[in-house]
Amino acid sequence: MGKRLRDPVHGLIVFDDTKIDLLAWSLIDTPEFQRLRRIRQLGVSEFTFPGAVHTRFAHSIGVFHTARTLVEVVRREMKRLGKDFERPKAEVALIAALLHDLGHGPFSHTFEGVQASRGVKRRHEKWTADIIRNPEGCIRPLLEGHKPGFTEEVAALLEKEDPEDIHHAIVSSSFDADRLDYLRRDKLMTGTGAGGLDFDWLIDNVRVAEIELDAPDEDGDEPRRVPTFCLTAKALPAAEQFLLARHTLHQQVYFHKTTRCVEHMIAKLLRAVANLADATDGNAGKTGLPDGHPLLSFFAADGETVTNYLALDDMLILGSLDALSKAKDPVIAETAGRLKERRLYKSLDIAEFGEDSGRQRRQLRRIKDRFKDQIEAETVMLDENAAIGIYAEVGGDDDKMHKKLHILDANKPVEISKLSDLVRALEPKKRYTRLYFANKEDRDKARRIKRTP
């Protein structure tokens, strides 16, 4: 009898007595994977959607389960195309799918943004690979016990930016296991009516076909061609709804103004802690955190090790808000106290001044001039980086061709916007510009600034 988990999205997930399922179950039991129980899939979205408390632990198991479905699609398609099914590569993809989120830090993309502002541009994919390769961790021995060299195969697949074969598409493509799980899971847990996903119909109409990864170069060389998942023409309506669901989730959930506000407040708090922890004048005590606290250890000079990184999670930071609210540093104390009690900054969306982009820019310029000092002090925070298009992806790289959805038109893969008026209309990115004010009075003053006709 295998191991079983009951999941709100997939129902019963069964781990059989096969080698790969036994390996997956052993990996789930490692401290590195169990840490994902303490990292929320949607970060701070629970401030807006109280049910959005699902974790990257549950999501990762769902991705593994979905990857098994996609492996069977590959097996089916290889038979149709008269090609061999490569089980070893499929097993690498399955384990990569399971472990793909190991490297997420607390509050995920918010934490990456904090690090980037400090000059550390290291995405979670790199942390994931380092955790997998870590000779002192629990992941590597299990992978090497399965097969010598398996560790590097899994880590390399997760680090790879451009696909080389169909197995990469299981982990990273327009129709990968990650988004097939999070779209359904996030829709369910937030309670939003963000489009419909006809999962069974989509899976039934998945085919493997080659797409051009890039354009011909100046020397006239042929573009690179790689196999990926495409959908048959009769699945076009379902494909439109699939992309529309992603678009709506970004609009209603991921880029919700309150969620973005909380993310900016947490980023402000973490930057302030990092600045004091990294100082050489003994100011770390002003954070309110005790000596040896994992945040202080990580942000200290030369503290960004795998061990210190793995000590960080959402629960650690949320559980430290009380101590941070008593910090000697006024910025840390005030911001932590606000987050603890949900006394959030007040939002102002530039769209309130009308849809005309020129008018919006003029109004934003007036507000920035009036509140220049507050913006520098971050008592007014400017958010200009939220842009939503049909391929929008938080922290992603969806401009790449293999991340775009293709439909088979007369058996030739065609990017969906060339066939769908709906997708084409939503393809241009719409930018959302907001300001967050520490007090309501300043927000109201900004609203009353003379509007240009």
Image (cartoon, rainbow, N blue to C red):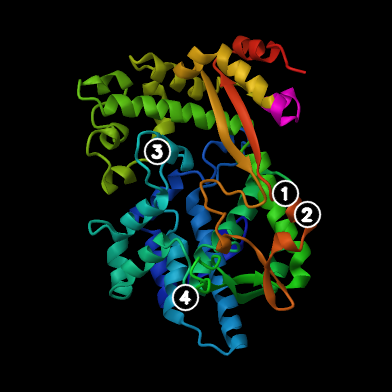
Dividing the picture into quadrants, the one containing residue 178 is bottom right
Magenta stretch in the rendered image: 350-359
Q: Which residue is mark 2?
A: 422
Residue at 50%, 24% in the rendered image: 339
Labelled disc at residue 90: 4
Q: Are marks 4 and 2 in contact (CB under 8 Å)?
A: no
Q: Is residue 54 magenta?
A: no
Which numbered disc, 4 or 3, marks the residue that appears first in the sequence?
A: 4
- Residue furthest to the front in view is 219
- Image quarter of the C terminus: top right
Residue 73 located left or right of residue 360: left
Residue at left 70%, top 31%?
A: 357
Q: Secondary structure at mark 4?
A: helix
State which tag comes first along the sequence, 3 or 1: 3
Give the x, y percent position of residue 179.
Answer: 58, 57
How packed mark 2 is, by other alpha carbons closer than 10 Å (few <14, some 14-19, many 20 or more), is some
Q: CA distance from mark 2 to mark 1?
A: 7 Å
- What SS does tag 3 mark? helix
What whole-number distance in Å separates the C-alpha atoms at marks 4 and 1?
34 Å
Residue beneath label 1, please?
A: 426
Secondary element type, mark 2: helix
Per the rendering, the mark at residue 116 is 3
